[in-house]
Image: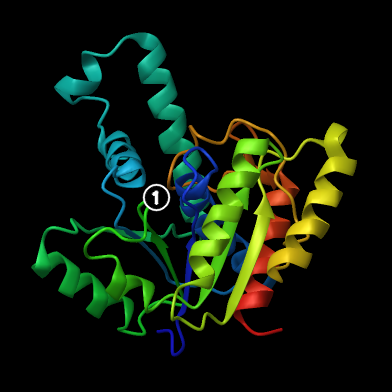
Amino acid sequence: MATDSKICAFMTQKGGAGKSVLTNILPNEIILWHLLHSGKQVNVLVVDIDPQQTNTAKRKRDIEQLSYKETSPEFLAMDIGQKTEIAQFQRRYALLIDAGFRTYKMQYVDLRNDTQISRALENIQSQEYDYVFIDFPGTLTQDGTGAFLQLVQHIFIPTSINPSDVLGTECFLKTLQGLPIDFQSKYILWNKFEASRLRKTNSTEKRLFNDYGIPFLQARIPYSPLNDCNTVIPASLKVNLNLGTYSVAKPYLQEMAAEIIKITNGK
């Protein structure tokens, strides 16, 4: 059981910047990093208070696919392609379970439901979890978000080099400046990084730091299709079902996980 939960959030007002995608991906990467480097199991909770319920819907889909039996009517009614895809998904997950991996727990909160809000706040503060990630709505002024925002210790702000994303990030940074909350740490991170625009990226990073005093994570996530990642298998892994092995195929995700672990542990 955890004794000092690290409460984190990927936050931005700009749609499409990767807030919910990263809230899905990085918790599993943190669990994997601890398993690979220390052999330790860490308990991680993701609390979805975004009314879009993106990650909640993905988790429900994954649980449903993992629960299918080959003899169930639902499975038998599928075409051969669907059956193969689900069977391989189940085998990949089973291989990781055998290796000691345990995915994060998820809790959805309807911000119109006071009972759900109270239960979630109690769960977050229970000290049962080593890490808690909260997926916020795009606007922090929505009713019900304030109590969750007060608990956040570490903020990670995803952006890309696209002008609209940079502008959205600056608007959000100004919003943060007006909040009466003393976060332990605030970082910006590059999502959808393009090496061909490195000079522009570096100059923008320097300008934002000079203007707002918020550093960037060193790890950068290149432009890659991460939106369709499931919620139970680390996105960095490549699983070989024939050999019964797995390996890290996207090291930048593990690098970002390691950096977040270091920051949230005050190192």
User: Residue 30, can we see it?
Assistant: yes
> Residue at left 27%, top 42%?
60
Residue 236 point in image, percent of width and height: 64, 45
Along the horizontal axis of the image, is 39 left or right of 216? Answer: left
Residue 89 point in image, percent of width and height: 44, 33
> Residue at left 78%, top 35%?
194
Name the quadrant containing residue 26.
bottom right
Disc 1 packing (10 Å; few <14; some 14–19; many ≥20)? some
Along the horizontal axis of the image, is 3 left or right of 109? Answer: right
Q: Amino acid at mark 1?
A: Gly
Along the horizontal axis of the image, is 185 left or right of 67? Answer: right
Secondary structure type for disc 1:
loop
Name the quadrant containing residue 223.
top right
Q: Quadrant of the C terminus?
A: bottom right
Q: Which residue matches tag 1?
A: 138
Name the quadrant containing residue 49.
bottom left
| Residue with the most extreme top position | 79
Residue 105 point in image, percent of width and height: 35, 61
